[in-house]
Image (cartoon, grey):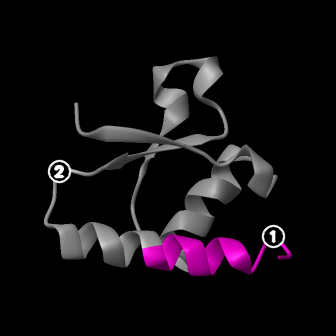
Amino acid sequence: TYMVWLDCRSLGLPKEELNAFMLHKAKIVLNEGSISGDGGDGFMRINIACPRFVLEKALKQLKQAASSLIPV
């Protein structure tokens, strides 16, 4: 499989806010982990079956967006 599970629970966002954060702040579209059941709450799934530069760009955007929520 080319789906990687990202543990986003430390961001402290409810499901709806987590989706909005990914879309509007990180500017990436991920799959909700909760589509696999209640155990997936707080997780997002990213498809890594893409060109490397696309994945690197998405991960950089996610890192930058997440750093705005979590103090270093």
Residue at x 69%, y 58% (from the top left corner): 17
Residue 20 is covered by the magenta coloring: no
Q: Is residue 70 left or right of residue 16?
A: right
Q: At which x and y percent is residue 42?
A: 67, 40
Secondary structure under the numbered disc 2 in the rendered image? loop
Residue at x 24%, y 39% (from the top left corner): 2
- Which residue position holds label 2? 49
Q: At which x and y percent is residue 31?
A: 41, 45
Secondary structure under the numbered disc 1 in the rendered image? loop
- Range of residues picked out in magenta: 60-72
- Which residue position holds label 1? 70
Q: Main secondary structure of the magenta part?
A: helix
Residue at x 13%, y 66% (from the top left corner): 51
Image position of 49 with respect to 61: above or below? above
Image position of 12 with respect to 61: above or below? above
Give amino acid for label 2.
Ala
Q: Is residue 22 left or right of residue 39?
A: left
- Image quarter (top left, top right, bottom left or bottom right) of the N terminus: top left
Give amino acid for label 1.
Ile
Pick whichever, 7 or 26, lies toward us.
7
Q: At which x and y percent is residue 70?
A: 81, 70
